[in-house]
Structure formats: C-alpha cells, structure tokens
Amino acid sequence: MQKVIISCLLALNFFALDAKGLEIFQDTTRSDDERIENLLSLLTLEEKIDLFSTNLGVPRLGIPDCGHFEGLHGLQIGGPANTYSQPTTIHPQAYGLGETWDIDLVERIGKLTADEMRWYFSQDTLPHNLVMRAPNADLARDPRWGRTEESFGEDPFLTAAMTVAKVKGMQGDNPRYWKVASLMKHFLANSNEFGRDSTSSNFSERLFHEYYSYPFMKGITEGGSRAFMAAYNGWNGIPMAVHPVLDEVVRPQWDMDGIICTDGGAMTMLFTSHHYVDSLPEAAAQVVKAGLGQFLDRYKEPLTTAVNSGLVTEKDLDKALRGNLKVALRLGLLDPDITKTPYYVSKNSPAPWRQDYAKSLAREATAKSVVLLKNAPINGNTLLPLKTEGIKKIALVGEHINEVIQDWYGGNPDYSVTILEAFKQTFNPLGIEVLSVPDNRMSEAERIAKEADIVFVVAGNHPYGTKPDWNFCPVPSDGREAVDRRSLNLPNEDMIKQIYKANPNTVLVLQSSFPYTINWSNENLPAILHFTHSSQETGNGLVDVITGKVNPSGRLTQTWVKDITDLPDMMDYDITNGRTYMYFEGEPLYPFGYGLSYTDFVYNSADIDKNNLNSNNLDEILTINVNLSNQGEMEGEEVIQVYTTYPESKDSLRPKKQLRAFRKVNVPANVKISVPIEVKLKDLTKWDENSHQWVLEPGQVKFLIGSSSSDLPLTVSTNIH
C-alpha cells in the first residue's frame, strides 16, 4: 500500500489549466489521445486501481460515476430478483427478437433501450450508468445450451446482422458521441453452462474467424461497438480473460480500442477453477497485462498486491485503462459540462417507457417474433387465423397463462399483459367465453376442451428469472444461466395428447426459450405457434397473430432436431462435425429459417446483375433481383433468404449451404413485386489458415433463394476469377 499512498500525496497539487480554464482532458478541441494521456497523468495510482471496476467515474476530477446495466431485451435496472428494480420497456427475449429477422425493428428497440438508459442517467436516485451489456453476440450452436434464450441464433451472418443493428440503435449516429456504449457478451465460444468456469472450447483458427468471432467482429467493425466482456471459458486451453488473441487479432485487426472486461468472478476463476495461475495477485496481473480494463470481481486487494510486488507496473495499468477512458470520452463524461453533450436528457423530460410508442413497439416486436410452425387444414379450413363466427367458447390451458415471466436478464415492466388477460379482453366483448385451467389435474383440461369450440394449450419452459439460486432448474428440459438442458422433450406433451383426444381443434402455443423435439405434436396437431417469454405485451402480441390482425412473419434461427441423439457431443465445438444447418446431415424437425404465413408466397424468378466477379475487388457488391408473388388474400411479410454453395470448390470444410443475404419485405395481397437484394463480395470469402486472411475462392458461386434453408426454389450463379 505504500506506493499507493505516495502516489496519492503527489497528486494533491493544483491542476495545470489551459487558456480556457480547462484541463486538457476536458478540452473538446484536443485530440482523443491528448485528452486521454492528460487524464492518465492526473490520476493517482489509487484512482487508477479504482477505475478497474465497472465505474468510469473519477469524483476528484469531476468525472461523473458511470457503470453498467444489462439490456438484452430491454433495460434491466436491478432485474426481477432485485429489490430496487425500476420500470422500463421489456421486449421478447433475444431469441425471439432474432426470430423476427427484422433488422429495422431490432435497431429501433436498441434506440428505445438507450433512450431509457439516458433518462435514468439524469435522475438523482439511481446508479448513473451508460454502459449497456448488450447485445449477446454468442452463437446458439447447440439447443441444450442453458443461455440459448440470450442469443439471436445459430447462424453467424444473421446474428452479426442483428448485433450490428442493436449496436447502432443503442449508440446512435452522432459522429463523435454515443448515446450509450454497447458492451457485447461473451467473447468467445461461451455455449456450455456446466463447467463454464473451467472448460475449454476447442476449435480451429478458421472457425474462430468464420463462425464464433464473426458477430463480434461485425459488431465492432460495422456496428461501432468498442466494448465486450471476455467469457469464462478458454479457447484451445487458454482462458479468454487472458487470451493472446486479444492482442494478436482483436485490437490490431478490428481496431478494438475500448473496454474489455472480465465476466463476473472470472479473475478469481483463473486461480480457483482454470488453475492457470498460482495466486490471485498473479491472476490480477495477467488480466491487466492482457489489456482488460475492467474487473467484475473482488479485485482491488489482489491488484494492489500485484502492483506493490512488481507483478504488474503502472505503465501496464495505463495501457489497460486507455480503452475505458476512450469509452468515457465517447459518452461525454470527460467534457466540462455533460449537459451540453448531444444525448444528454433532462431529468424533467417524459419517461420513455411511459410513452405510447414504447408500448406499441413492444407489441409489434412480440407479434413479429411469433413463428407459425404448422397450420394444417381440418375439413378444408385451417384453425388460424381464428374465425370467431360461430365460436361460443375458447379453452385456454397452461400453467403460466396468467403471468409474464422474466428471465435472469429480464427487467421490470411498468405493466404486462398476460395471455389470459388478452384472450378475455379480445374475445369476451364478442360474446365468446374463455375457459381456463393451468393443467389437467382431475381431468380439468379435458373437461373444458370438450366444452370448447377450440383449445389453445400454452406449454414450454420456465426461465426462473426470479430465482437467485443459479442452480435452481428442476426440469431437465429447462435451462438457464449456469444450467444446461439435459432433455429436449416437452414435459406437457402427454397432457396435449389427452386434450387433443378430447377436442381435435387444438392449437399448441409453444412459449419457450429453446427448441423442443415435439414430434408427436407436429405429426398430430393441426396448428402450432412458437414465441418466447418476457415481453410486457406477451398476450396482446400473441392474440394479434391468432386473430389475424398480424400475419405471422417469424422465422426460426436454429435447427430444431427430431431427437437429442441427432446432436454431437455437447463439448464438441467443431461445428463441421454435424452441427447447425450448415453441417447437419440428418432431417430436422424444423429447418433453420423456417416459418409459415397465413398467405401464400410464390418465388417466381430471380436474376443477377453480374455474371463475373474479380476476386481482387472485395468491395464489389452484386444485386440479385427476386420476383415474389403473394397469391393469397392477406397482406404479409416474407423473409427472402439467400444461401450460397460452391459446386467447384475442393474445400471439404465449406458449408453445404450458408446464409449470405436476407431481406424482410411486406407484400400486399394478390400482388407481385421485384425485390433487390445486395450481396457483398467480401461476404463470400473464407478464412485461409496459411495466409491468415480472408480470401475469395475462384470458381462458380450458386445463390439459392427461398423461404428457409430447406425450401430454396430459385437459383442464380456467378463466377469468380
């Protein structure tokens, strides 16, 4: 501690002000580097150590406190298990947002979440935070992963597009300032919960670039994020909190010059779980030398000991802290008057979460996240959209139909509309009685099913967001942070069989954070919907789709297998061994990109504007024009998906097909449209492990176009020379 005390005494001198009466770090006419170097020169050693927390504030120098909040699907202030939770707008889980395939929607959600964070930053009674831990750029490579609910899906291209949209929405479009700082989670390959504190995710350099790091890279290079959290696990034997890839790839190649922080307790785990170091001070020193500027840990004593014992130098501290200060600068925290910065919000301004726009956005997101998995006709007519003429009674069955459940990173919505409430508010005024029971005890569900004209069964998982015990997850097919799923079976499928026997007009509403192997339901039930938990507009969004007010446009972002034995070993991170739609050899229950509509879309033709491309011009863009018809009687949105395959390639590791463009478009009833879809040539590259760079393989490229990874009726091609 002696060195810390001496440094504090030396800093008790007057600041050297410039001609404007400002410290150099406050002078907005100076360069970023000048401001940051000046600030580092003014900090005491103790203040530098304090800055390794998640707080960017330095009270002595007038830099306001600023920490982190979670924001995966709405701003989380405290969370459902915390007593100081404050209201915000809560949207469907990230898994559901991914299923919208709607980039504009995700960007608007990011913007609203950032607006709410800025509003709360101006209030007097709460922590003042402007760093948002979102989005989650991890890939859901395996449906058993307990945190699948936090991911946009299994595909790197789609997840990258959603990540970029969320980052742009949160950070804003000002060239100098950010509305909030987007801190992505969790770098890298963090998709097993059991043993996450000590396991290593092992895979090639090529998969690092083409798969696992791709959304993070895009989030930084295209989205503009300059912050992320290092994962608990290791990659090829080295924990991510100290991995050399941070200095070898992330910083120099992606221009990542902001915050890198540990996950919660990860510094300690280097010693206690990974056994990578021999002491906590050594762990702290290793983290700092790896360039991480923030600890989510009890780090001060180990780091102070590391400094005083010479394990780490003050120069090392300065190097690691520069990223923190760069983010603070972008947030306006280093300016002399933060109220003059572009994104400052007055504390007297209206709360964003109270506005009609916030409520309608949550409802829109919920409805657009609904995936119609099946809608087979009975006697020539489908059950959905629901035709209310002649219906007198609707049966609604489900344990959680009268609650909106938040996951571990869910917030505290100002209000929530349950499924039961929405059914009653919608159908009771039409003279339709809504019968409801939680389950089939004493055959109650079968009884009301026999009384009703149609039955809706709501089944799925419980996110356990209010349970502070992370290990609480008693149902094997459920999962959460710290607990992976051990089953893909739907526990309520036996009850569904009984209800269906009582009334064949049965619709399954699968409200879940994960895929299930619902083989019996898919084979027998006439209609199945999927959507996720947590939205404050859960009930309204679902009913909007059921009644046809909204034509379902959600599409799956994961391959739904038929059986758990179709999956490789949980710890096999080499996806080329049969994982994801790109390498899976079996027949899925539902393929990646799949989802039905209440109308009929027909892919008529497609043409491409360039038949030959120069492999030396990676900035080139080609356009595919897709002619699409809506041949039904209802307006609807279709997600046009473009996949590539390389018939002349001798590279056995290239995916059998790979998403490389998509566009969600609205098509009026009985209308044919032409939709231009751009494909960037650089998105056709692959990673070459010999030259350690992206390369464009010469030969023919086929573009397969359609409505899912398994329904691609149109093909166009080009040649790369």
Image (cartoon, rainbow, N blue to C red):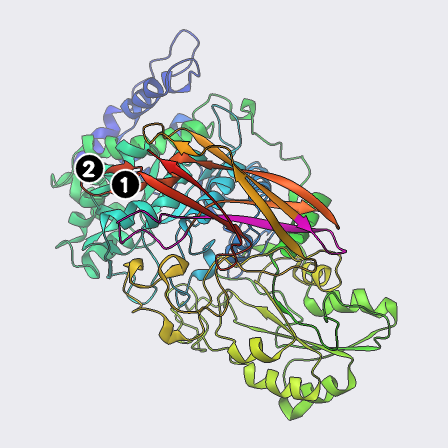
Proximity of marks 2 and 1: CB atoms separated by less than 8 Å: no
Residue 635, compared with residue 445, is above or below; it is: above
Residue 456 percent coordinates (x, y): 68, 75
Counting residues from the N terminus, which is met first, the one under dot 2 or under dot 1? 1
Foreground residue among 271 and 525: 525
Q: Write the residue at 33% across / 23% down.
A: 36
Q: What stretch is highlighted in magenta?
A: 629-657
Disc 2 target residue: 691
Disc 1 target residue: 292
Judge left or right: residue 507 versus residue 167: right
User: What separation in Å lies between label 2 and label 1 (alpha carbons)?
Assistant: 28 Å
Residue 549 percent coordinates (x, y): 75, 57
Foreground residue among 82 and 207: 207
> In the figure, residue 105 lies in which quadrant?
top right
> In the figure, residue 196 lies in which quadrant?
bottom left
Q: What residue type is labelled 1?
A: Leu
Q: What residue type is labelled 2?
A: Ser
Query: What numbered label is drawn on residue 599?
Result: none
Q: Is residue 427 magenta?
A: no
Judge left or right: residue 326 versus residue 705: left
Residue 696 percent coordinates (x, y): 31, 37
Badge 2 density bin: few <14, some 14–19, many ≥20, Cα 10 Å: few
